[in-house]
Image: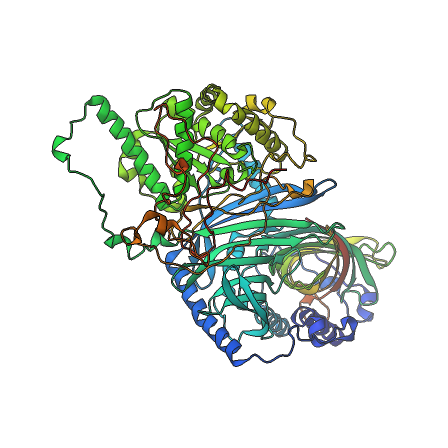
Amino acid sequence: MTKLHKSCIAGLTLAVFTVLFPVHAVGIPLISKKPKKDALPARKLTQRQSELIDKSIVREAEVIKNLKDRAPLVETYIQNMKPDVALLQVPESDQHFLGRIDFGKVINHEAYDTPDQTKKSKGKLGFFKNSLSYVSGLSAKLHLRFDEGGIVQMILVDSKDYNRQTYKFSFVRNDFLGSVPTMVFDVEPAGKNKRGRFFGRIWIESRGGNIVRFNGSFAGSEAAYKEYYHFDSWRTNVQENLWLPTSFYMEESDPKSTENTVKFKAINHIWGYVLKVPNSDSENVDVEVQGATDVSQDAQDLGPLGAQRAWVQQAEDNVVERLFQAGLLDAPSPFDKTLEQVAGNILAYNNIQVSRPIRCRTLLTEPLESVAIGNTILISKGLLDTTAIPGNNNEQVSNLYAVVAFQLAHVILSHRLDTKYAFNDRLLFPDSSAFTRIPMHHTDKDNEEAAKKTLELLQPKELQDAQTQFGLFLAQLAIRSKALKALNEPMLGDSLIKDETQGTFWLQALVGKGPKLDMNDLKQSAAMPLSAFTRFDPWTDQVIQLNAPFEPLLSSRDKMPFEVTPVYLKLSYYKPPVDPAAAGAPAGAAAPAADGAAPAAGTAPAPAAPAAGTPAPAADGTTPAAGTTPTTAAPATGTDTTPTPAPPAGGTAPPQ
Amino acid sequence: MTGYASEETQNQRPRLCLSHIAVRAADVTMRRTPSRPRHLLALAAIGFLSLLPASLHAQAKAAGVRSADLQIGAGYVGAQSDYDPQHHFYGPAIYVVYDFRSHWGVDLSFHQVNSSVSKDVTYERSYEIGPRYVRHYGRFNPYGKVMIGRGVFNFPATRDHSVNVANLAYNIFAFGGGADVNVQRHVNVRAEIEMQRWMSFPSSHGTSSLSPVLVTIGAAYHF
């Protein structure tokens, strides 16, 4: 019996030791490990380098404070990739997250509700469908999945302990990112407990000691249980000496791939810094319209129809304003004028008059969707980017005609908003419920009618190219739509896809009108990668047209339609907005500075820019400025978008 | 049913005497453990309490997480029972492990160990459930667990143990530890040792418990 108890104690002790002390920690020869060498080269920092690091620690605390106070939005779009013989790699599936930074002890994430999450199947089989989805949800738990809270960590080097005690720094070199001089350091955790600590490379700008870029990963991955991924995080100079996270790119290689393909890649955008904490200047701005005369005494009363229209307009304005407050719409941007001009052109070519002017705004999310809220047309950033085909034949404008025409058809057919939103109490809900509380998508019947009307609107000979070009776009989307379900799932409005299972579109009639899709034809571009045409200012939420040079396609692998691509911002320092009254002569104000600095945000487009910047009046018989996209005056936030004289079209290729 | 003591059994090494077998109703409550098992409990408690997960000290949250882990497996058990120390017991085992956190989970086990003596009807069957703590080091996943459950003992009657006289159930608790090794994406191999304590088990050596030690080798499908 004594032997038995001894064996019990021995066995129990063995069990506890097995768990308490991993063999590698006590260096048991069974699984021996060589002592780990220091990853960073042993090189002392100079005083200047050391001072810059100390500055960056202070500045990083300021960034964290801003994130805590301002709770910006974060959008993540992930594409899981698989190898492809012809194209190297193609998307296999995708996921989309949208939420707000929620900063407790460490940075976290509060997701926006989507309609899918709140939808429950009804009807005879509803119980079984809901049970099945519960079971499949359980099954999903057993596999590695992306965690939004973990992804959000990548906007900061360390949300708690970025300091000299926790991290070791090693100088690499001096470098320029855009026009910003930086010092580059390699960073790794100093202590023994490295789990969750950053290791990689950071760029600190030399003037203010702000971190402007960092890439690497967090230590402590446990394969198949808890994984940290590699990322490249960028910041922009949104205000004086304030660099805030703007975008970051995530990627992880596929270790099993022989072609060096990636397992997945993801793009993340951050914006909405002033939504919760408005700019202190905004309250003190005096609005004075030059040359206006007071005609309030002459205002006419509204008749019954006028009152009805005003009531509908109020509902629409309330919804648009609410969506803007929730961070989903851009601030009024110069680029919106381009879209309004496109809408005006369509009406002009068809000799249609509408009771109120058409307004356009951009949805700041990636999923491909558009919606008409009364006379306001919203188009998602993802749809604008992927239709921005560079070329000499106005391919981009043709695509925009088709996209805008679909929603214009809803406007013309009077598919209007529920007027209940004219009552403001309907809009008192948390921002995260915006998608579920303001469902804006049209019914299938409305979309069918609008699709027929769109084909009529695109009949004029000036818009024939829109049919062929957009047909080609849809043909490309048809190939990718099965893999990119999240990209085609609308959050607010109407998808291009009519039937997911059959892969048909609302504008299916256009598919046959386009040329045959040929991935090997380098002169044919059906759709662009994401973020090809626009980016937005994370502080003002304005949409900005990129001024990217033409990149020649060398093979079909360069096309990457609807794919995520890395982030690479051309940084510059913040320049405060120029007071238009003090600008002097318009030509002088518009002239680019010698050092390529961008003019201020929020200023009107330079009068020297072509008339494409102004909306064409409806049905006035003037030839619309077809095929032109304006050079918008770039804002002052910290990316360098040097204005150029009016190009023929955005990012066009040189003649071949 | 009352037992009887045979002459032969009285003259052998102290072992379970049939006269000590008592027919009891199912006892669903745990009795107070004697002092030695209390020490074992304390040791196990200290072991588990000291295993504070490293995640409490972690900085960034992981971007890829697995919410839960499930494996269902079977194995072969060898047991050393103090009921019949001269011979070993062998038999099958089935286990289901559900880890609902990265380091914490629930283990359900079934063991059936039969005497290795030919025609001996003696067997020990146990059904257990309990929490487990696991660490992950690449493919190697050591764990420790504390189990409670029910044990069924099949007592022999005749001298050659070929006929059973009683089949009784007892509350049991157990400590164990081992390691799961990921040999393939969906296959884990396990080696485990477990010390069971069968409460109120009639014993001829003064203590009212049976304390078999079980060693299991198994394989599981990892979902």
Q: Is residue A119 left or right of residue B11?
A: left
Q: Residue furthest right?
A: B118
Q: Which residue: 45% across, 22% down?
A: A450
A15 over A151 or under it: above or below = below
Q: Is residue B54 left or right of residue B185?
A: left
Q: Is residue B24 above or below residue A471?
A: below
**Residue situated in front as seen by the camera: A473 or A374:** A473
Q: Is residue A187 visible?
A: no
Up/down of A347 relative to B216, above or below: above
**Residue A521 seen from this side:** yes
Q: Quadrant of the N terminus of chain A?
A: bottom right
Q: Determine the residue located farthest toward the left in the rendered image.
A: A297
Q: Which residue is at the front of the view, B104 or A309?
A: A309
Pinpoint residue B159: horizontal percent, then vertical percent.
84, 59
Name the spot of residue A570 as percent of width and height, x first. Answer: 51, 56
| Closer to the camera in the image, A33 or A186 | A186
- Image quadrant assignment for residue A26: bottom right
In depth, the one of A559 and A148 nearer the eye is A559
Q: Is residue B84 left or right of residue A121?
A: right
| Quarter containing the C terminus of chain A | top right
Image coords of residue A298 (percent x, y): 13, 30
